[in-house]
Amino acid sequence: MPHSSGEGDEPMARATLKLVPKAEAAGVSDEEIHDIATRDRERAFDLLVRKYRDRIYYHALYITRDSEEAFDVAQDVFVRGYHEPRLFDPGFRTKAWLFRVCTNRCYNIVRDRHRRGGILDRLGKASAGLQVQHTAIDAVLDREMSEGVAHAMDALSPEHRTILTLRYFDDLSYQEIADVLQVKLGTVMSRLSRPKVRLHGVLSEGEGE
Amino acid sequence: MNCWRVQNLVAPFLDGELPDAECEAVGAHIEVCAECLAVIESVEALPPLTAPRAPQELEAALFDRFDACLKERLAAGIDPGIDAPTGVGAAVAGLARREVRVPMVAAAAWLGVMVMLAGGVALNHTKVQDLEDSVARREAIIQALQERVAVADARSDDGTDPPGRAMAPVFLPPSAPSALGAALPPRRGLYSQPGIVGASVRQASYDAPRVVR
Ligand SMILES: [Zn+2]
């Protein structure tokens, strides 16, 4: 379906997109990317993808617990970013926007999965010809998330899991989390505190068994 | 600062994200509150939450493919068209809220209009009732006056009161004089003896205050 966002619709010459090497993007600040965008939006977008694709993919992976879905979500996030006219506007919180789009997309997936009662309908889809990698990553994730504090997170609500993920897995600042979740800083503080207290409770219960 | 507030600040307190004033308040509280101190110590003792990562070789293959896929999609101009056009969850929530709010506003407006209409109808009804009562009173007065005129006519014919038609006092409401003024002029044209009518009117006017009192 053709996208209909209207203005700002002259993004970049589509076929010419070349992603810059990751190492080059790693040290570039968001401010520099915004500055580059005023002269060369295409290059700024390349840098943005290189800088954030891992983090967006992993954020999706931690929430969906499914590598293939996380991969698709991360793709969608950047395609949407490409079509987002405000992406490099002065004052636009690009990083928070990426995480917000990603978080909401993941919520929808997890919710739909609950409705369908599982992820069985993904069999045979095998997006991007990466079935081997996805399966291997899912296995690693399952193993790491099946013990200790990470496992205790399963006992939390999706909202609490998400905020802990944003803070301790994705390493976002309190202010960035506030921007992602579109809540006040004080709300982030209390929403991070309660699940941490709860985590201790869950772990203590586990020890008592 | 109370316990509830302190326990809502455990994370920023331990992460060093709390403004100085609040940090001091939490510190002062846990010096005297063993329960909150225990909560903070238990959270502090939690093993670090570290992000699981895929082995590097898997990651490398994954992100190579990621770049290639993204290039393909952007070159094809495929818009994901996911969820709401821009505002994401907030916008979705906003939309949902708006969907609810629009009918709410409409319902409130409809209710308001109905209340006003009902109020108007009720007000009109009572006003009409008042007018009807007033007309009925005036007609009663006119009736009584006409009877007096008839009696006076009969008297002037034979000089006696007709049987059963003695001059009953007319019970006039306070509005009687103005009512009479409005009611009488046409009568004057109908009856040929204005003098008698005038006497009758005076009689009625005098009777009323006395009897009412
Ligand atoms: Zn306390």
Image (cartoon, rainbow, N blue to C red):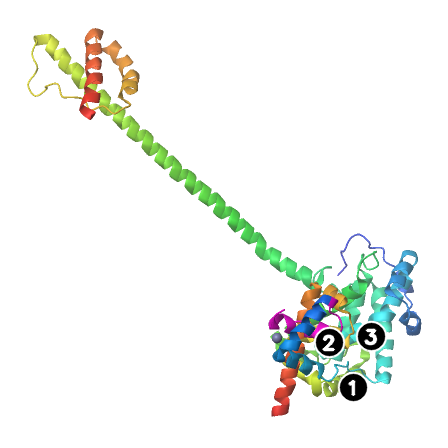
In the rendered structure, which amino acid carries the disc numbered 2? Leu
Residue A185 position (above or below residue B182): below
Q: Quadrant of residue A46?
A: bottom right
Does residue A110 appear in this view? no
Which mark is nearer the camera, 1 or 3? Answer: 3
Distance from disc 1 to disc 3, alpha carbons, whole Å, reads 17 Å
Question: Counting residues from the N terminus, which is met first, the one under dot 1 or under dot 3?
Answer: 3
Which residue matches tag 1?
A136
Q: Nearer the viewer, residue B55 or A160?
A: A160
Q: Quadrant of the C terminus of chain A?
A: bottom right
Which residue matches tag 3?
A54
Which residue matches tag 2?
B14
Name the quarter showing ligand 1.
bottom right
Magenta-highlighted residues: B1-20
Judge the density around disc 3: few (<14), some (14-19), many (≥20) Cα neighbours within 10 Å. some
Does residue B98 appear in this view? yes
